[in-house]
Amino acid sequence: MPRAKKLILFEPWNMGDALIAAAIALQDPTRLVLACNPRWHPLIRAAAEGLTPPDLLAVDLDYVSRSRTGRWNPGSLAVLSTSTTPVVTIRGDIRDYNAAKKLFPDANLRSTGWLAFTARRSALLDLPFAKGWLPVRNRYRAWANIASVPWQNVEHFYQQKLAVPAPPLITIHIGAQWRSKQYPHVAKLAELLTKTHQVQIVAAPADPLPDGIAETEVRRLIDHPLVDAFRASTHVIVNDSGPMHLAAILRCRTHPIARISPIEEWLPPATIPIEAKDAPKGYRPHPGYMSDAVIEGWPSPEEIVAHLN
């Protein structure tokens, strides 16, 4: 029987993006290869512990950063492969398409997601999605589709939740380098939860802290220590950022709080969000999405506790 031809999933962007593609690559790791930023390789390998990890290729592009300077400059690109192994991407970003063409010059390149990419930037194009007239494309489904991975395999993978650890532990990851994406009421939420549960608050090294949270109250974790903290948790409370996708791929009981961006596009399988009444729909996020403004209108701490109960 002939061996299936390799396929490269090209996802050079942020932690969450890389983990979504990694989740699909894990379904068929002998066929699927993931090309992503090398800073996420240790995290992906830690998340895949006990499973067969896919091969990882290092792609480090200059325009993939928080800075808006040089946002069209990919940097110096050396050819990664001259094989004809096909390459796919779902971002619909012309920069990614051009970078992939330079990195894999002899490969057949397929790109989808052009409509979603433009709708995210145009209120007019987003209107039929925001109104519910057209369905929003979920990124997990998009990767599964372009990689020819049966969706039922992905769903089954995410439904196999970790065993409930003892004693019960709730982990709150404050998430996101953009303060606008952070849940602003972490202090009150932790106060309520500590009445009945053991609680730990986690952040990445560069994450700013919400009001009412002191540095001494937070564990700054990345890579394997963050994976271990999530795996030891009964529940993980996150926002719509990279830690949501990490907790989900680990099959934790993951509770994303959604306010600043439409969650449907990003939601992992077998995950139910705690969504704000005024959370945007469609593709376009809140106008303050890429800012350090504190956005109001999130679900209350009491609503989140009720959701967990």
Image: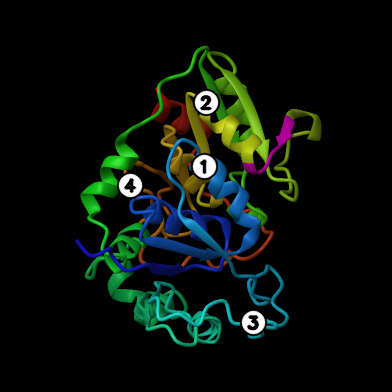
* Residue carrying label 3: 78
Q: Which of marks 4 and 1 is in front?
A: 1
- Residue 260: tell me if it is visible: no
Q: Image point 33% across, 47% down: which residue?
A: 269
* Residue carrying label 1: 47
Dot 4 amino acid type? Pro
For residue 50, above or below residue 306: below
Q: Distance between the residues labelled 2 and 4?
A: 19 Å
Q: Which of marks 2 and 1 is in front?
A: 1
The answer to whether mark 3 and mark 1 are in CB contact below 8 A is no
Q: Distance between the residues labelled 3 and 1?
A: 29 Å
* Residue carrying label 2: 233
The answer to whether mark 2 and mark 4 are in CB contact below 8 A is no
107 displayed left or right of 205: left
Give how far across and how far down residue 131 sits, in percent: 28, 68
Residue 269 disc label: 4
Mark 1, Cα crowd under 10 Å, few <14 / some 14-19 / many 20+, is many
- Choose between 193 and 142: the one closer to the eye: 142
Mark 2, Cα crowd under 10 Å, few <14 / some 14-19 / many 20+, is many
* Residue that lies at the very extreme toward the left in this rendered image: 1
Q: Distance between the residues labelled 2 and 3?
A: 42 Å
First to last magenta residue range: 218-223
Q: Distance between the residues labelled 4 and 3?
A: 36 Å
Q: Nearer the viewer, mark 3 or mark 1?
A: 3
Q: Describe the element under mark 1 as helix, strand or loop.
A: helix
* Residue that lies at the very extreme toward the front in this rendered image: 1
